[in-house]
Amino acid sequence: MLARIEKTATGYSATTGKPLNSEAEGNTRDETLNRLRHVVAARLSEGVELVELTIPAPHPLAEFAGDMKNDPLYDEWVAEMKAYRQEREQDAKIALCRWVTD
């Protein structure tokens, strides 16, 4: 956790800022930081919980999902892709058979 500490006319002042907005004052730097630690620990013991919140970003291509659905060539394209994939799989099987029998 980051804390800001600064010298004042009467000693030192330290603050954590958001999300806890905790602060403490003291005569010395160490005393002030220890007081701030106690203030933060007290807040956390009262049930305040700090968690990391992850917001997943949408997939960069999500906006294009389904774009081809209404395209008149879509069904033909899917059929061609299927045929090509089957052809490549067959070629791979033939190559594997040749490799095994050689």
Image (cartoon, rainbow, N blue to C red):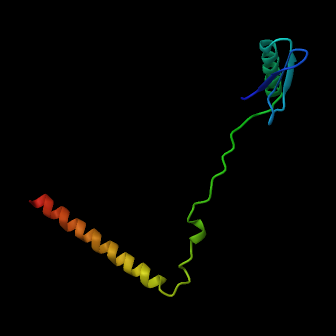
- Residue visible at 13% across and 64% down? 98
Side (left or right) of 101 relative to 87 = left
For this orientation, the residue located farthest to the left is 102
Image position of 79 with respect to 49: above or below: below
Identify which residue is drawn at 66% across, 46% down: 54
Relative to residue 3, is residue 57 depicted above or below? below
Which residue is farthest right?
10
Residue 102 x %, y %: 8, 59
Q: Left or right: where does residue 91 sit relative to residue 43? A: left
**Above-or-below relation of 53 to 14:** below
Farthest residue to the front: give it: 9
Residue 70 coordinates in the image, percent (x, y): 56, 83
- From this view, report whether residue 72 is shown above or below residue 95: below
Tally the marks: 0
Q: Which quadrant, please, contains the N terminus? A: top right
Q: Nearer the viewer, residue 95 or 36?
A: 36
Residue 60 in the image, given as x and y percentages of width and height: 57, 62
- Residue 62, x across and y down, in percent: 58, 66
Nearer the observer, 29 or 76: 29
Q: On the rendered structure, is 67 left or right of 16?
A: left
Quadrant assignment, res 19: top right
Q: Residue at x 22, y 66 (%)?
A: 93
Q: Is residue 16 left or right of residue 81?
A: right
